[in-house]
Amino acid sequence: MQQNNPIAVEFRHVTFSRNHRPLVSNLNFAIHQGEALVLLGRSGSGKTTTMKLINRLLTPTQGEVLFDGIPTTQWHEIQLRRKIGYVIQETGLFPHFTVERNVGLVPALEGWQPKQIKARVYELLQLVGLDPQQFAGRYPHELSGGQKQRVGVARALAADPPVLLMDEPFGALDPITRLELQQEFQRLQRELGKTVVFVTHDIQEAFVLASRIGLMYEGELVVLGTKDEFMRASEGGASLTPHPESLAFLECLRSLDNI
């Protein structure tokens, strides 16, 4: 079980405030190597803030986040971020770089040899379902939304980071492309065994992709568990009083299932 694997990231009594207002409060949880933890919640619930505390785009106001057993504040920021792939909804591709140069950016910064970079880029484009002969020389404006997201995932994986952060990466895509990429993500997760933290507001997506779901509400982590544990907690199982937010998301899932 992944919960028995070593801890990749740990939150210890973490609060992050802005203008004296906490955006997340007293977070205490661990993310284990090889698991896909989905942070689920409405807009403004603290999901993305929590994710940005992992790669030190934000620094805790109180408490500490540990990466590989070391507080993020003790890491050199660039060294930390090169161990963490990051995929966002808008992909963040450089428009004036080809696909090959976008994907090979971090290995180039790490000082890899050009032949080594090219081989890695071609390997990753194949892995995410893009023919490198067809796509390596293209520019982002020549790609569809789904193709851009695939390139974004390839770029995040380029230097083989142990942890991958994904912030609503499929949210802006049409439903068919979104489903295709969710299935592709599942395949990649199985093949590569990466530790993944995935942010979404879509409970269907959470149930498809997660090994565990962390439900956030008003800056707090109110439910954390497997899909079965989430269902039981939402139904008041194991003598638990269900949180109203988990009930709301579960009702949403059931209504979608009944369409």
Image: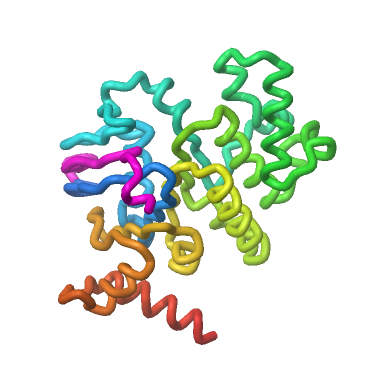
Residue 80 spot, x, y in % from top left: 40, 25
Q: Residue 11: x percent and y percent?
A: 24, 41
| Image-quadrant location for residue 98 | top right
The residue sitting at the right extreme is 133
Q: Residue 241: percent from the left, percent from the top?
A: 17, 75
Q: Is residue 10 left or right of residue 140?
A: left
Tell me which corner region of the image, top left, top right, bottom left or bottom right, holds residue 226. bottom left
| In-image side of 158 versus 214 (left or right) | right
- What residue appears at the point 26 percent right and 72 percent down from the top-left corner? 233
20 part of magenta stretch:
yes
Total count of labels: 0
Q: Which residue is pictured at 26% across the width and 36% down the height?
A: 65
Foreground residue among 141 and 88: 88
Task: Name above or below for residue 240 compared with residue 105.
Answer: below
Residue 30 place in picture, x, y as percent: 28, 45
Residue 227 colored magenta? no
